[in-house]
Amino acid sequence: MKDIEPEEMARRIWLTDKIRQVLWNYGFQMLEPSPVENLETLEAKSGPGVRDEIYWFKDKAERNLGLRFDLTVGMTRMVANRFDLPEPIKISCIGGVWRYDEPQFARYRYHTQWDAEIYGAAEPTADAEIIALGSDILESVGLKDHIVKISNRKLVEGFLRGLGIQSQNDLDQLIRIIDKMGKIGAEQAEREFTRAGLSKDKVKRILGFTDIGGEPGTVLGELENKLPKGEMIHQGFKELSGTIDRVESLGKKHRIKIDLGIVRGISYYDGTVFEGYDRDGEDVGAIFGGGRFDKLCKIYGKRDMPATGVAGGFERLMLSLERKDLFPDTQQSPQIFVVTVNETVWNEAVKIVQQLRGQGIRADYDLKQRPLSKQMEYADSLKVRIALVLGPREIKEGSVRLKDMKTGQEKNIKLSSVVDEIQKALQ
Amino acid sequence: MKDIEPEEMARRIWLTDKIRQVLWNYGFQMLEPSPVENLETLEAKSGPGVRDEIYWFKDKAERNLGLRFDLTVGMTRMVANRFDLPEPIKISCIGGVWRYDEPQFARYRYHTQWDAEIYGAAEPTADAEIIALGSDILESVGLKDHIVKISNRKLVEGFLRGLGIQSQNDLDQLIRIIDKMGKIGAEQAEREFTRAGLSKDKVKRILGFTDIGGEPGTVLGELENKLPKGEMIHQGFKELSGTIDRVESLGKKHRIKIDLGIVRGISYYDGTVFEGYDRDGEDVGAIFGGGRFDKLCKIYGKRDMPATGVAGGFERLMLSLERKDLFPDTQQSPQIFVVTVNETVWNEAVKIVQQLRGQGIRADYDLKQRPLSKQMEYADSLKVRIALVLGPREIKEGSVRLKDMKTGQEKNIKLSSVVDEIQKALQ
């Protein structure tokens, strides 16, 4: 169980605002599916195996329920019966998801994700749009040096089918091994392929396939020769090159690298897939990822719509931003602290505090009415920027003492124009 | 299970921003406790009876866990061992809470709350501060005509003890009946008091007590005569009048009404208690409420701090705002939709879209590249404000047609200054 402390919270609020603005700029409308779903809704997407990876339980009416483990399921369920919405439907969500992680430590994990989905557009333009969106979200938070690795599920599936692997179960299993190759390494992957019953030759050919990649300009040309023929591979190639064309229109071609090792682990992807990485921080893992899932709507509702989407985790993104010191100063502390010399000026002090607050300035005072030095200590511990010192003499003179808590500099300002003066001082 | 649709989401985002700004202005730092707590943490505050009212379950390691039913428990747990934080500690949270509601329909309910707590200040100034905060949150969202009904638990407890009720269980039970009197009515309350074993005379005296209320200026003077003597009542009176004094310093006395029928149902309150109401919408119920809970920190940690806090539900607040039509236009739709006459201008159109997005303007185009009339239809259904129509002729002339989707008015603007022109048109 993870609490979010104020310093981290301030950064999350900043991040949420930034990401939301880019989502809006791209025409995505925010919504939020219920955090609790029927267990069968969660299983429909990923099979009963998902039970081991999520929070689920029986409610008092003996229904099986689960906490959402991603936002895509709920968002898809929300639109799958909405015949009133014109296509394409562009929706997005920022919210918490729960995954049961490392059961040996009995830990539950709570993560925050941003997620954007497009329903009702089979065109590669839609895939390009969400890739550009992901890239611009990273741009907007200052993570300028990132790449998006792209491939297509039809390519890998067509290739594996060409090797004689036909059952969907076997295909899914091999795709999951390819997906984790980056994490477990080629040697371990080789062992897992062999354990799955593949011959040495086939393992070698798979490793050769997943190794293909590079600049789209070069690789697209080579692919036609390197890949075996076949309807599925042809279709995958068309989708991939179409998406890259559109990414170029959107001004993002320089962000793209083809990488046939990118497959995404979840079984519902069936077309273009991609993952975004911080270029010097690939060890953190993908900071966003997504792809096309044309068959999911049909599972949840009557409206059969093609779909493509992208999601990113807050925690990894924050790690990348922290490493590069890209967070701005997201202080939540009061900017102004009004210090009273004694009780006689209390009412005047509180009045000033309320005036400042009314102008959108973070202002505070000592609720405990302690002696002056204690008030200063407290203001200092809160990292307040400016202290206003008010005493009977100041009030008589119609002034108040302004102290810069960083430099220690002091000056007197007029009591009658205190809000204006403070606004100037804070600029 | 409740999904939040885009229209409601836009209003929630607006509301969150407004409330957060007031919380910050008042010097509260945002944080967020874990949504999942150990069941015993949740029970510590409210007793094992709480199991019937919340989501709880065993995890795979056989631990009892529960989803938070309020934010106070988690926030208090977070600070109860933090000896490093200087007092008073002012923290706040906006987040979801879960309550098991109306089990006959097997429904789970998810609500959003805002919550602000002050730890480490026993002074009535702290109670006044959170009352002023609650009032200013309502002001900031436009709910100008509201009142805060205030009382003190020590008054009611002292009064009940004076009637001979001594056990904490009995006191808690009677206080819960008083708490729901507004909902169930005096007659039903009378029946419940009688069922609890009270004589007719005692019931009458309780109803007389809870009926006391009115403007603080008048009522405070009368109270000294009306109330029985005793240490507890004396202390309660001192706290109540002290809080009202401070509320006056904070400029909020006109918002306050004394109402001895206000007790708050939860058993951990032990001092000043209050509830905020929309003046013409009391049927909605309290839109915020809170009070002093000096003994709660000790339950969760080693740091024994007095505490006082306030919380409000988003759903009731939204209902009040909707009734009075106080929400601003919180459209999430694209402001600009770029329409293409044919495919030859596609790249130019997408370039304009990306420029607008880069300037923080919500801009979109047709991902499906449909014919002009279909694009217009789609833009219209999205409630787009301005359509930019781009064709080969326009590009040759270095211009683009701007169409106001509301008035139907059109004009040509220069392609080279399209961003500037749009920014002007949106003002």
Image (cartoon, coloured by chain):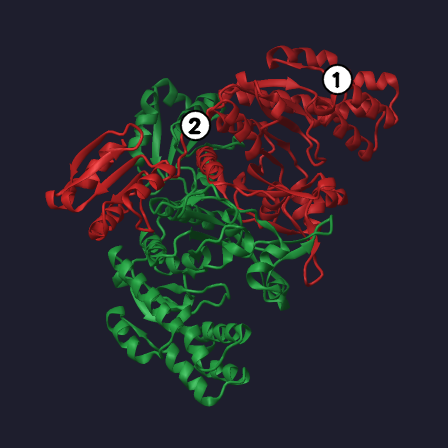
Chain colours: A red, B green
Frontmost residue, A66 versus B336:
A66
Q: Residue at x 51, y 29 (%)?
A: A133
Q: Position of residue B193 (x, y in %)?
A: 50, 82
Q: Position of residue B111 (x, y in %)?
A: 51, 55
Asked which quadrant contains residue A124, the reply is top right
The N terminus of chain B - image quarter? bottom right
Q: Could you tell me the amino acid type at mark 1?
A: Phe
Q: Is residue A254 left or right of residue B224?
A: right
Q: In the drawing, what numbered circle is on residue B353?
A: 2
Chain for numbered disc 1: A
* One can see residue B5 in this view: no
Q: Is residue A377 left or right of residue A304?
A: left
Q: Is residue A95 left or right of residue A7?
A: right
Separation of residues labelled 2 and 1 (CA atoms) = 37 Å
* One can see residue B272 in this view: yes
Q: Position of residue A36 (x, y in %)?
A: 62, 51
Q: Residue at x 46, y 53 (%)?
A: B305
Q: What SS does tag 2 mark?
A: helix
Return the residue found at the far bottom. Answer: B200
Q: In the drawing, what numbered circle is on residue B133?
A: none
Q: Residue at x 76, y 25 (%)?
A: A158
Q: In the drawing, what numbered circle is on residue A209?
A: 1
The C terminus of chain B - image quarter? top left
